[in-house]
Image (cartoon, helix red, strand yellow):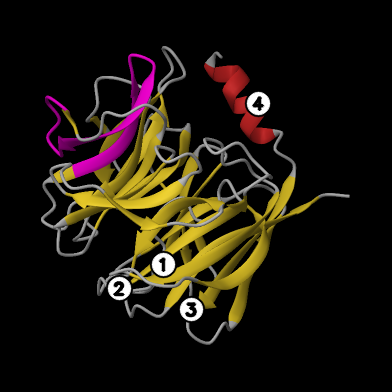
Amino acid sequence: MDINTLRQWIAERDSISILKTLDVHTGERTVLKEFDYVIEAPNWTKDGRYLVYNSLGRMYMYELASGDIKEIDTGFAIDCNNDHVLSPDNQEIAVSHFTNEDATSRIYILPFDGGIPRLITEKGPSYLHGWSPDGKYLAYCAERNGQYDIYSISVNGGEETQLTNLPGLDDGPEYSPDGKYIWFNSTRSGLMQVWRMEADGSNPTHMVKEESNCWFPHVSPDGKWVVYIVYGKGDVDPGDHPANKNVELRLIPAEGGESKTIVKLFGGQGTINVNSWSPDNRTIAFVSYRLKA
């Protein structure tokens, strides 16, 4: 796929997007704004003022108090996908951008206020999901030699470290707030399920065992809760997470236990690809969709 074809595909995903917040304990939902086009994957800034999201290849900030929207200047990186993360100090943002030469996603870092991106992953495809709490490493899903696994790399680039190496898809790696663990989702047991491993890739533990396909575990800032998105067992292939499906968001204690559904919605791809917990550990931001008539 060349880059112009990719841009056309992004633009033609014909849905209305509804940006919302949800109190995970009371179930109270708040609609922030409807968009007549696709937006995806809100991140919450640590000061609680903004939600950062991607749309049509660009990055934006939504101010919760005013509803004002500002585009983030990402330089040449104008084909960003829904895998983006803020640095722990919120001074920088890392994005996954489809490079022009081969329309393959690679990871870049730039100032949060805007600026010229610097390349982190020489190889592609690479899809960012986590930034270590000490600010030193990124965790991402990457395809190498025909297999998708989880890797880490210094924020200064250089050699990448492979953390998983099993048949099937490993995706969605995200550091726990204490930096001890990486949460991720994997098809290694058949269905897509939620796992946790040590930050060096050791001791993988199956944390969510459900008869459904579970994606993108996101850990609350205090490390106590995990939210993830669920597709019905027969609705999708285990390794696929398409848009415009009936899905659920579920909540579990980070140390394991019974999950509970906190919202049902029409969404999927773009709903909650990256961590969107509020800094007070109570609220998540997400995107639902509605097909245009």
Which of labels 1 and 3 is toward the front?
3
The residue labelled by disc 4 is 8
Specify whether 102 is left or right of 236. left
Q: Which badge, 1 or 3, comes first in the chain's sequence?
A: 3
Q: Which badge, 4 or 3, comes first in the chain's sequence?
A: 4
Kindly report the distance in space between the C-alpha atoms of the residues bearing marks 1 and 3: 19 Å
Camera-nearest residue between 140 and 85:
140
The magenta segment: 138-160
* Position in image of residue 238 (x %, y %): 54, 39
State if disc 4 and disc 2 touch (CB < 8 Å).
no
Residue at 60%, 78% (x, y): give it.
Answer: 30
Helix, strand or loop for the magenta stretch, by majority: strand
The residue labelled by disc 1 is 50
The residue labelled by disc 2 is 47
* Position in image of residue 111 (x %, y %): 25, 47
Figure check: 71 above or below 260: above
